Amino acid sequence: MQNASATPQPPAPPDGLTVEPIPAFEDNYLWLIHDGRDAVVVDPGDAAPVEATLGRLGLTLRAVLVTHSHADHIGGIGALLARRDIPVYGPAREPVPHRSHAVGDGSWVSLRAPALELAVLDVPGHTVGHVAYYGQNRLFCGDTLFACGCGRIDQPAAVMYASLMRLAALPPETLVYCTHEYTATNIRFALSIDPHNSALLERQERVTAMRAAGLPTLPSTIGEERSTNPFLRCEIDVLNNCSDSASMVKLDSSAILFAKLRKTKDSFR
């Protein structure tokens, strides 16, 4: 096993911005994007750790971005705004408290401080109006795409699959900032259906070392997800064969295989 201190990390985009993970609840990450002075927070489910991080780093919060309306993503907005008059960007098709800017596909978030230009992508599936924010080589995807996994779905499986395929089409070097530390469990599930994937086996070794050292496993990259995440690989014949080996019936579309995999993952322990 590699020494955790030698674990390679994705390179930071050369724009002077830092993305700080703020742990919250049991396994959430609230993402703080900053330039050393001004900051934006993504999906602030809890205000207290955000305030603590802003104080520790001496940052001024300038905006809030929301991907969807689940409580662990919006619960801290009110407390953050009690002390500030700042914009809140959130999906137009979901109830987001204190939202000042309703966004959807084709919208942009443009800020001067920190200097940020993010396109809004509609990625429904986990919820009806879920959005992601993409730009400057970074993707903030909420609970749609996870490291080696994807979110639970409350829409038809084909809707979620289309959203995942949209994200998978982004450049492979895109840094993926999802919002839960599910990576180790997701890898165990992936190996249960794709046990001979060398990239997946290497990822398990690396993630095990990172978690043993208390390190976040994020961000990943779109390229890494394409090679190891079973929910982005439903067109791969070996995945189809492994996932359906008991019945030996080949599924006739990637979307159907995705639905089967997601249902299987729901009961995986």
Image (tube, rainbow, N blue to C red):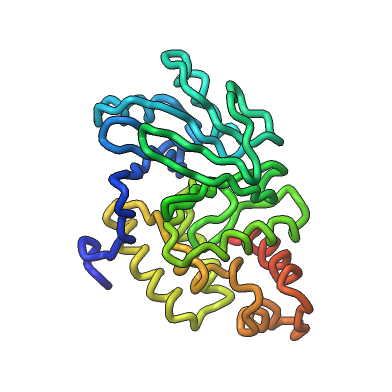
State the residue at coordinates (65%, 59%): 267
Query: With respect to residue 38, does 227 lie above or below?
Result: below
Q: State the residue in front, 233 or 14.
A: 14
Instruction: Choose top left, top right, bottom left or bottom right for residue 4.
Output: bottom left
State the residue at coordinates (69%, 51%): 125
Asked if residue 243 can be seen in this view, the reply is: yes
Q: In the visual, does 163 lie left or right of 145?
A: right
Asked if residue 22 can be seen in this view, the reply is: no
Q: State the residue in front, 254 or 249.
A: 254
* Picture coordinates of residue 32, whole percent (x, y): 38, 38
* Picture coordinates of residue 204, whole percent (x, y): 40, 69
Looking at the rendered image, the quarter that the N terminus falls into is: bottom left
State the residue at coordinates (50%, 36%): 43
Query: With respect to residue 68, does 200 lie above or below?
Result: below
State the residue at coordinates (47%, 50%): 135
* Picture coordinates of residue 254, whole percent (x, y): 71, 73
Residue furthest top in the image: 82
Looking at the rendered image, the quarter that the C terminus falls into is: bottom right
Q: State the residue in front, 266 or 111.
A: 111
Q: State the residue in front, 61 or 195.
A: 61
Query: With respect to residue 24, does 269 lie above or below?
Result: below
* Picture coordinates of residue 177, whole percent (x, y): 45, 50
Number of marks in the image? 0
